[in-house]
Amino acid sequence: MTTPVKPAFVPTNTETLSAVQGRIAILVDGDAPVTLAARRLDRLMRGALTRFMGSDAYGKMKPGDAADLAYPAGLVADAVQVVKLPRRVDLAHSRKAGGAIGRALGKADCLVLAEGHPRAADVAFGLTMRAYDFADHKTGDKADLGAVTFMVNAPQVVAASYEQGAALAEGVFFTRDLVNEPSNVLTTVEFGARLEALRDLGLEVEVLDEAQLADLGMRLLLGVGQGSETPSKVVVMQWKGGAEGTAPLALVGKGVVFDTGGISIKPAGGMEDMTMDMGGAGVVAGVMKALALRKAAANVVGLVGIVENMPDGRAQRPGDVLRSMKGDTVEIINTDAEGRLVLADVLWYTQERFKPAGIIDLATLTGAVIVALGHENTGVFSNDDDLCNAFLKAAASEGEGAWRMPMGQAYDDKLKSRIADMMNVGGREGGSITAAQFLKRFIKDGMPWIHLDIAGTALVKGDLPLSPKGATGWGVLALNRLIRDKFEVK
C-alpha cells in the first residue's frame, strides 16, 4: 500500500534559509522576487533569483512549470526549484505547481516557501498527488522520499485546510494501488479482502459469494466468471453519514481483475494492461474510502462486481443465451464484451435493494471510447440532465476531463437479437454508445443515471501533472466533489 507524502507546515522564518539542506522550492509570480522569503533567498543567492526571473528561460515557462537552479552560491541547499505561478492563482495552477515539486522529490528533504500564498494547501495537495510511486513489487534500494515542509504565514490554518485533501489523496492512492496491482496478486479473493478491511474506517461492508449471487439470479455476472478458478463476488460498501432514511447515492463499479476476452480472446499485444480492467471498481472503492476518512455528511452506497474473464472448458461461449437478474435474456455475441454483463446485474440489484436517489456506474468498458476521446476525457452517458450537468461541473472543477456522449433509439436498435431479448454488442460503429444503451436497459424508469466509460482515463502511458504514468485514480476527485456539492447535508 502506497502511503501519501504528508507535508509539515511551519511559520515563515527567513533567517534559517542559509542553513537549509536538501532542496528549496519557491513559488513566484511576476518578474522579480516580491515576498519577504523570496527577497531573502535572492540576497543569499547574490541576485541569482532576480537574474533568472528576468531571463528568457523564465519568460517561456508556463504557470505551474518549474526550473532548478542547481548548487546555488550562498546556500547549503543542493538546488532551488523556481515554480512559476500566474498573478491570479487558481486551483488548477496551484495543484500543478505542487505536482511539479512532487515530481522532483528525492531522498533529500524539501522546504517549500509558500509565504502568503492563498492556496498553499492546494499546492501541498498537488505535491502529495504527484509524489505517488507504486513500488510494492520492486526489490533492492527503494527511494524513500525525504521530509517535506511548507513555510507559510498561518501554518495551523493551512494544515487544517490540507486535511481534506489528505483524505482525498488516500482515496486516490487506494484506487491507484488497486489498478496498478498485478492480477496474480489482486485476485477476486484478495480484492474482496481489501475492501472488507475498509470496515476499520466505519464503512459497512458485505461480500456476496457465488451461491448468494446464484440465488439472486445474477446469471450474467456469474457467466463472465465461470471460466475462472477464482470465485466471482459482489461487494457492498455503505457509508451512512447523512440523515437517517435519506436515499443514498449509489456508485457501481466493474471489477474484472483480468480480462483475456474469454473465448473471444484478445490479441496478445497489450493484454498485460488488462490488469486495469477493474478500474471502475477501484474508483468506487477509492471514493468510499475518501468519504469515510473525511466523515462525509452523506449517504452513499458503493457496489462492485468482481470477476475474472478466462477461457476454459467451462467458460461461456459466443451464442450462449443467459437470463439476467432483471429477467431479460441476453445473447452472448462476444465474450470480450463482459463488463456490461457484470454491471447489468449489479445495477439491477442496486436499484431493487437500495432504491437510490441516483446511480453512477464506472467501467473500463470499451476501446471505442478511446478512439472517440483519447486519454484526455472520460465518456459520460446519462438519462438525466440535472445529475449529468452537476457531475460535469464537478469534474471540470477538479480538472478531470469528461465529455458527454449522445444516446438514442437508433443506437439501442443495434442490440436487437434474433433469439433473445437483446445481444450484448451492437457492432463496431458507435461501440461505446451501444454499450451504454445496453446498460440503460437495466435502469428503471425515472432513475437518474450516469455511465462513465473510463477506459481511456483510468491508466495512461505518460506522466500527468498530478500522477506518474500508470493508474491515475481518475474519478475519485470528481465524484467526491459531486457528493459534497449535491448530496451532503448542509
Image (cartoon, rainbow, N blue to C red):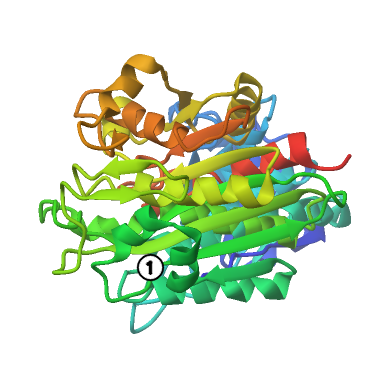
Q: Tell me: 376 left or right of 159.
A: left
Residue 482 point in image, percent of width and height: 68, 37
Residue 48 higher or lower than 176, as above or below: above
Residue 405 point in image, percent of width and height: 42, 22
Query: Is residue 203 in sight in this rendering?
Result: yes
> Foreground: 53 or 187?
187
How many other residues sit within 10 Å of disc 1, few (<14), some (14-19) or many (≥20)? Answer: some
Identity of the residue drawn at 52% across and 76% down = 193
Type of amino acid under label 1: Glu
Instruction: Using the rendered view, name the quadrant where residue 337 is placed.
Output: top left
Residue that badge 1 annotates: 181
Instruction: Using the rendered view, name the quadrant where residue 412 is placed.
Output: top left
Q: Tell me: 379 left or right of 397.
A: left
Identity of the residue drawn at 23% across and 67% down = 227
Instruction: Using the rendered view, name the quadrant where residue 310 is placed.
Output: bottom left
> Foreground: 351 or 474?
351
> Foreground: 322 or 185?
322
